[in-house]
Image (tube, rainbow, N blue to C red):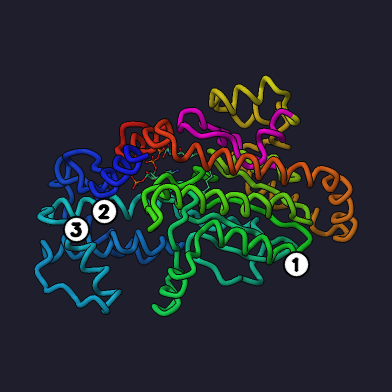
Amino acid sequence: MAGFAGRLARCWYSGFLRSPLQVPALGLHVGGPAMQTSQKDFNNAVSQLKLLKEDPGNEVKLKLYALYKQATEGPCNVPKPGMLDFINKTKWDAWNALGSLSKEAARQNYVDLVSKLSASSESPSPEAPAADRKQPESDSLVVTSGDGITTIRLNRPTKKNALTTQVTPSARESILLVLSRLFHSKTMYHDIIAALQAASKDESPITVLTGSGDYFCSGNDLTNFTSLPAGGPEEMARSSAVLLRDFVNCFIDFPKPLVAVVNGPAVGISVTILGLFDVVYATDRATFHTPFSHLGQSPEGCSSYTFPKIMGSSKAAEMLLFGKKLTAQEACAQGLVTEVFPDSTFQKEVWARLKAYSKLPPNAMRISKQIIRDREKEKLHAVNAEESNVLRERWLSDECMNAIASFLSRKSKL
Ligand SMILES: CCCCCC/C=C/C(=O)SCCNC(=O)CCNC(=O)[C@H](O)C(C)(C)COP(=O)(O)OP(=O)(O)OC[C@H]1O[C@@H](n2cnc3c(N)ncnc32)[C@H](O)[C@@H]1OP(=O)(O)O
């Protein structure tokens, strides 16, 4: 265990250095094509940023701020704000972290980041349900209700919608609220739990989970494992197992039709929970990947039970033991996906269909779901508890730690 804790601490304190040509905290290039960005490109990017349709989130805004300062004023040369000046100190830290990055390289990184954001900031599809009600949210989760559908949208497109356990305050929240959320450890997982609990009681007959940008979700955010609590790795594994169990329980118990609109590739827990959905619509661009062995981990989301039941034990084993990535068509043939749509018409067709379904009598749909699912619930809760316990041990294993360290040091990607 000492080896594990030591390795984790070393990774954490070294900031998961990626390559000598990158500024570790922000993953920015300091050499290469930087000289090619003109002042005009930079000015264009500044204007382009104002046209973004989606708020990119605090983390990205901080990156943009730091790059802008570096590009326009050079290395940070102002005194560090006091400890209690929380916001200005955070901004100063981000700028200061850029060190001696040249103005030209900062301009290039700024332009690259804005163009990446513009590409992934999809305008909402005209076919998506009208949002007549928007619930309180963090930036990384957007919940809207309209046309009889409550839509829970994972909204960290620049991180492929990875599910983070870091506190993700809304840009609109006050500093006091940020501090209170830090205290209560509210995370994207908690936000999804809260959104599902609210949706289970709201008036929309149908609830949808989907993602922003090109991915549905890249699974658990692997950097979650780098924020060690005071109790060390054991406490981290224990609290993560509790959070995982609570998270999956919400899907098991969800009382209304629950539909996944899989808008792109899905990884890890975002694939396994699909076995708990009533209907799964996927774009033909989607893939389904559960690389648990690669990560030294084990199945969750009740997939050790639902996958063999859905696709047979040997197909399930190929996914869950060997991490075979399925195309959307394969996932459909194996029963994990209900129907696959061409990417070009995906949003239009799926939302039109869901809007029509949402007009069906809501109580009849609820009761039918109850009859279909209820006899399985006890079993699913037991499976969820067991999977969470097994994972708690796995997260403390060398196999798991090495795999995560390898991803974070950019040696491996799926
Ligand atoms: C309470 C805890 C419950 C835990 C439950 C157990 C859950 C288990 C799982 O979900 S296992 C699956 C974990 N996921 C992964 O292993 C995926 C890791 N990501 C990748 O391999 C790749 O990022 C990719 C294949 C998803 C996409 O590759 P690519 O198209 O080349 O994009 P980038 O890699 O450049 O990604 C952009 C940006 O996003 C960051 N990112 C993406 N996914 C994750 C992730 N899962 N965790 C952390 N970060 C992720 C990636 O690092 C890039 O960040 P950067 O721009 O470099 O800062």
Q: Quadrant of ligand 1?
A: top left
Furthest toward the top, the residue is 314
Asked if the residue under mark 3 is in contact with the one under mark 2, i.e. CB atoms within 8 Å, the reply is no
- Estimate how packed mark 3 is, as few (under 14), some (14 to 19) or many (20 or more) residues with alpha carbons within 10 Å: some
Q: Residues within 10 Å of mark 1 (few under 14, many from 20)?
A: few
List the residue tagged with mark 3. Answer: 97
Give the x, y percent position of residue 414.
43, 31
The magenta segment is 280-308
Amino acid type at circle 1 is: Lys
**Toward the viewer: 326 or 239?**
239
Q: Is residue 120 left or right of residue 74?
A: right
Q: Residue 5: percent from the left, percent from the top?
A: 34, 43
As drawn, is 256 to the left or to the right of 185? right
From the image, tell me which residue sits under label 2: 111
| Residue 266 appears anywhere in the view | no
Dot 2 crowding, Cα within 10 Å, few <14, some 14–19, many 20+: many
Quadrant of residue 364 within the rendered picture: bottom right
Q: In the rendering, which numbered label is found on residue 201?
A: 1
* Mark 2 element type: helix
* Whether residue 167 is situated above or below residue 20 in the rendered picture: below
Using residue 332 as the reference point, say whether residue 283 is left or right of it: left
How far is mark 1 from mark 3, CA to CA? 45 Å
**Is 295 inside the magenta-drawn segment?**
yes
| Quadrant position of residue 318 | top right
- Secondary structure of residue under mark 3: loop
**For marks 1 and 2 on the same chain, the one whose residue lies earlier in the sequence:** 2
Residue at horizontal 22%, vertical 58%?
A: 42
CA gap, disc 1 to disc 2?
44 Å
Q: Which residue is drawn at the image coordinates 29% and 46% (left, top)?
A: 9
